[in-house]
Image: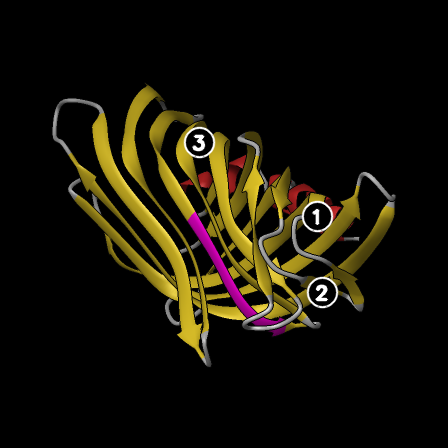
Amino acid sequence: MKKTVLAASLALLTSIPAQADTLLGLYIGGQMWANNAKGSFGEGEIDQSVFNFEDEYQGSFYVAFEHPIPLIPNAKIASTTLDTVGGTTLTSSFTFNGQTYTANTDLDTTLEASYIDYTLYYELFDNDLLTFDFGITGRDLDSYIHVIEPATKIDSDLSASGIIPMVYLSTIVGLPFTGFNFFAEGNFISYDDQTVYDVQAGVSYELLDNLAVDLDLTLGYRTVKLELNDLDDFYSDLTFDGVFVGAILHF
């Protein structure tokens, strides 16, 4: 369903006539992210187990629409996938979704998580030297966690989803006459023993700049934190971080 909504949004944005480009801006970006996942999860704030996760390559992309109308915010839709597998040897008993595993048990896990960010934002500055945006994001998070004891095939799983409100900030600092820019962007929130953030920083290079389209290449570092407290009975303290490369088209 989410993919359908995102595809429809992209189709709507790309249908804007080309002659409006002098007033309207369409951005399409994507990145390939080599991340390392680490941390714990469980069905309680205390009853969590640390798993050793495998490094993965994850993809993410976004579309953003900007306009010159005062007071009406710009809009951005971004999609990110966080899938990984891992394992652990329990040092104490661990209960997950009603199933209890005893100490010294080997467990494997599959973690499938994805989210779509719906962001409304304003541009405080927008020039070749400095761009600064601020706004709010609704993060629509879906996750599925499967735990299995390979020796006995005893398993348990849990699906969790929810909308997480977040603050959005973004800035770009230009280096005149070089084609290079420094950028930083983040969504974050912290309340009631929950901390969720998604921050990235890096450098971009303007490979193409003409009246029809701009193309920037990006290189940076990204960190995602999911410290969740009772999201559909799911508790976690997970971090994903690593280097990414990407590209941004501006029409």
Q: Position of residue 45 (x, y in %)?
A: 55, 73
Q: Residues within 10 Å of mark 3 (few under 14, many from 20)?
A: many
**Residue at the outermost top position:** 207
Q: Is residue 174 visible?
A: yes
Q: Position of residue 131 (x, y in %)?
A: 24, 49
Q: CA distance from mark 2 to mark 3?
A: 44 Å
- Is disc 2 placed on a helix, strand or loop? strand
Residue hosting label 2: 95
**Residue under the point 27% across and 41% down:** 183
The type of residue carrying mark 3 is Ile
Residue toward you, 123 or 191: 191
Residue hosting label 3: 248
Residue toward you, 95 or 141: 95
Q: CA distance from mark 1 to mark 2?
A: 12 Å
Q: Position of residue 213 (x, y in %)?
A: 44, 26
The type of residue carrying mark 2 is Thr
Could you tell which of marks 2 and 3 lies nearer the N-terminus?
A: 2
Please check the rendered image and state whether residue 226 is part of the magenta-colored stretch, yes or no.
yes
- Is disc 3 placed on a helix, strand or loop? strand
Segment colored magenta: 224-230
